[in-house]
Image (cartoon, rainbow, N blue to C red):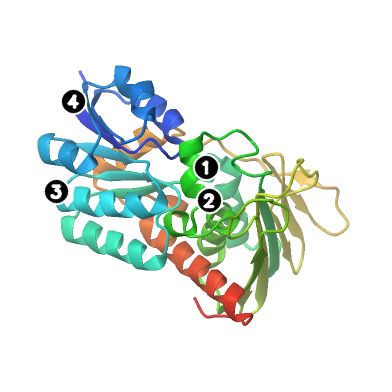
């Protein structure tokens, strides 16, 4: 019989929370003990939990938890995580790590002081192509990589039907860290950091180009400069329809690696385009993976690692600074 894992959830306003609660239900021994949220969303989730609170601080004070899922806005999630780690509770935080690098650094300090697991969950982390792409790059499958392009997003959280509580903080630059740049530019920033390390400088153009209501940006173009490489990232709340074609694409001196609808392919001169065999992940449930890290005392790998996620915050901070200064900025 699996050992009981007493699980709490702090926040329901991050729209990804519902899938993560379902993921926790599949963890052997998981017991959904307590839930905290101050919005009417609490009624929607209460049936799955023993107890509910309208204040996460009260929940942490009253409950003995073995793990905490943190799914509030980007600003409050940092505050919750720091408080939980200080109480010795491992934390699974839904992307992005924080609204800015200062909050991310405070989370890292709390994790190091506690010695407890901190994992940042990105939906992108469960795509096998990401790890095969890194493997191919590390093996110099296309020689020296000199450029990557990556675009991600949709027509906007309000436009695709996200609930008012999710939309409310996504549209608030203080709580989110930006607009589309924070929501989707964060994905590009974290995979760039994972695949290629930190850039030398960051340049960004962003704005509200299509919305008739106030948001800090609905589209952002971010350019990362490396010693012998460039990366172009787009995060959008302004793209209405899906775009065909590969994404991301990495161009190298001797070839190109590109992802087509989840399938990694390699383009080499004089050869037909070939699919790259991409093994399935050993574990695709984020809650099970997280508990494996907790039980084995191992750090989450790849973009799930908080050090890498914190560096993504530094890249975005530099991008936002650049969008205001109109100059390239160091991360």
Task: Find disc 4 in the rendering and name its residue.
Answer: 3
Label 3 vs label 4: CA separation? 21 Å
Q: Position of residue 9 (x, y in %)?
A: 29, 35
Q: Position of residue 252 (x, y in %)?
A: 73, 66
Q: Do residues under tags 2 and 3 come within 8 Å of each other at their CB atoms?
A: no
Helix, strand or loop under label 1: helix
Label 4 vs label 1: CA separation? 38 Å
Q: Quadrant of residue 12?
A: top left
Q: Nearer the viewer, mark 4 or mark 2?
A: 2
Residue at left 46%, top 38%? Answer: 165
Helix, strand or loop under label 3: loop
Label 2 vs label 3: CA separation? 32 Å
Q: Position of residue 315 (x, y in %)?
A: 51, 68
The tag earlier along the polypeptide, 4 or 2, is: 4
Task: Find disc 2 in the rendering and name its residue.
Answer: 171
Task: Find disc 1 in the rendering and name its residue.
Answer: 167
The tag earlier along the polypeptide, 4 or 1, is: 4
Task: Find disc 3 in the rendering and name its residue.
Answer: 87
């Amino acid at each position: 019989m699996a050992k009981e894992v007493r699980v709490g959830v702090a926040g329901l306003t991050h729209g990804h929370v519902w899938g993560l609660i379902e993921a926790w239900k599949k963890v052997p021994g998981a017991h959904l003990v307590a839930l905290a949220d101050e919005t009417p969303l609490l009624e929607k989730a209460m049936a799955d939990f023993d107890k509910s609170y309208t204040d996460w601080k009260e929940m942490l004070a009253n409950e003995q938890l073995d793990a905490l899922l943190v799914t509030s806005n980007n600003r409050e999630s940092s505050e919750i995580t720091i408080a939980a780690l200080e109480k010795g509770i491992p934390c699974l935080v839904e992307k992005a790590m924080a609204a800015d690098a200062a909050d991310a650094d405070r989370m890292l300090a709390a994790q190091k002081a506690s010695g407890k697991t901190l994992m940042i969950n990105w939906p992108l982390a469960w795509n096998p192509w990401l790890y095969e792409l890194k493997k191919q790059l590390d093996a110099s499958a296309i020689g020296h990589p000199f450029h990557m392009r990556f675009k991600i997003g949709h027509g906007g959280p309000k436009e695709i039907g996200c609930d008012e509580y999710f939309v409310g903080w996504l549209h608030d630059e203080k709580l989110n860290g930006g607009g589309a740049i924070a929501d989707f530019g964060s994905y590009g920033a974290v995979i760039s950091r994972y695949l290629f390390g930190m850039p030398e400088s960051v340049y960004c153009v962003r704005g509200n180009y299509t919305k008739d209501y106030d948001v800090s940006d609905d589209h952002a173009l971010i350019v990362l400069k490396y010693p012998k490489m460039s990366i172009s990232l787009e995060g959008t709340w302004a793209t209405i329809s899906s775009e065909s074609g590969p994404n991301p694409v990495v161009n190298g001196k001797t070839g190109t690696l590109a992802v087509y609808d989840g399938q990694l392919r390699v383009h080499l001169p004089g050869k037909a385009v070939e699919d790259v065999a991409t093994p399935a992940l050993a574990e695709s449930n984020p809650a099970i993976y997280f508990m494996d890290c907790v039980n084995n005392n191992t750090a989450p790998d790849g973009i799930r690692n908080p050090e890498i996620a914190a560096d993504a915050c530094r890249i975005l901070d530099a991008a936002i600074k650049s969008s205001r200064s109109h100059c390239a900025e160091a991360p």
